[in-house]
Amino acid sequence: MSELASGLAIRVEGVGKRYRIGARREPYQTLREAMVRLASAPFRGRNATSADVFWAVRDVSFQVRHGQAIGVIGHNGAGKSTLLKLLARISEPTEGRILLRGRVGSLLEVGTGFHPELTGRENVLLSGAIMGMKRADVLRKFDQIVAFAGVERFVDTPVKHFSSGMYLRMAFAVAAHLEPEILLVDEVLAVGDAEFQKKCLGRMGEVAGEGRTVIFVSHNLSAVERLCDMALVLRHGRLEFEGPASEAITHYLASTANGERSLPLAASRPGFGRVRFRRVAVGDACPVVRSGDPLSIELEYEVFEPVPDAKVQLTWYNLMGEKLFICSTELAGMRMADLPGPLGMIRLDIPSLPLNAGTYKASVLVRSAWSMEDFLLEALEIEVVGGDFFGTGASLPADGASFLVPHSFELSALAGRVVKAP
């Protein structure tokens, strides 16, 4: 700890964590088994063992100053949770070293560090003792912890009887209120409802505002951008990007999978068939977009016969199959006496996507004045993540609403006699 420079809370140097796939250590070996294994070692191939090695984290280095809030983002399996477990000392790194300055509070999975046979009250006191706090300091925070968790009636009940939601609320309340200098939070917050997530994010913001360090792993990019000033992007266990949160999110979105789906064979699709779509894709090849950001869709087609008065339409749905809105050449005032061919492309531009966080699909069709020519059900799927749509830093939870509508309010006083309600 003395090697940590002044002002730094965390320093990670070339850290890696290696696992051996399929390896299982027997609880004990007899002397005969040990001797047979030792004697046969020269005859066992090395390739088999090296092929079974998996690096969950490899060659990761970064520094975090006191009072910083750092987000960690990446796809599933990128090594985010493994990195947090290394920081929390739950697991030891295979290579490299981690230096920490200050008490560490962590919430990596529901009920981490809780003893199921102890009551909520006893677990609070135990957690405080593990973090090196005095009993008097824990008791001073006790009422705040219980009130935040909302488990006043059950605080003297063994936590093994708690529901998963109660467990989570209690665990987070303890981790966030016992004044850790470093708070580690994993995606476990996704277990809670929207109101609880908002409450937790608010508390983490307070912790960061009090000059303590927060490491936050989440797929909620809006929360990361709102809470964190810096972010790390992990990919296949390696640190791919480190920088301001907004730039890290942009880098992560740009590196996601291609926003193009395979189209069914033309012969199996409904329609008269004088025009067929060849490709439907997000314009920038990224199927993840933030609320309020521009979105472009490219529709490549092939013309087999002239199609008079052609119209192209995209119908957008949520995952429940509810129709949300329609984009069409007709509504946009685009008149086409004929589609240029034999190959062509139509580009749809939405300047500011009015959708809240969630997954959405679009069906595509082209029709003439008297017949449908081609129809693709669920031709496109996009993932929308929360963004600063309103330009105020505020956002709706994912289940708050589907649409985001620009609006404003005006406040004024009304002159006249005040009539009191009976």
Image (cartoon, rainbow, N blue to C red):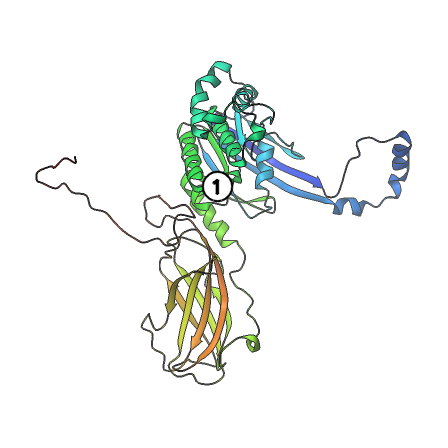
400 above or below 228?
A: below
Mark 1 falls on what kind of element?
strand
Image coords of residue 204 (percent x, y): 44, 33
Q: Quadrant of residue 202?
A: top left
Label 1 neighbourhood size at 10 Å, few (<14), some (14-19), many (20+)? many
**Residue at the front extreme, as displayed:** 422
Please indicate whether residue 38 sits to the left or right of residue 154 in the image: right
Which residue is at the front of the view, 358 or 106? 358
* Residue at 76 percent of width and 38 percent of height: 24
State the residue position of label 1.
Answer: 231
Please indicate whether residue 338 sits to the left or right of residue 109 in the image: left
Give the residue type that dot 1 points to. Answer: Ala
Please indicate whether residue 8 sits to the left or right of residue 41 in the image: left
Identify the image quadrant of the C terminus.
top left
Image coords of residue 72 (percent x, y): 51, 41
Which residue is at the front of the view, 162 or 185? 162
Which residue is at the front of the view, 273 or 183? 273
Which residue is at the front of the view, 400 or 407? 400
Image coords of residue 277 (percent x, y): 49, 74
334 above or below 123?
A: below
**Residue at the bottom extreme, as displayed:** 305
Identify the image quadrant of the N terminus.
top right
3 above or below 384?
A: above
Please indicate whether residue 372 sits to the left or right of residue 164 in the image: left
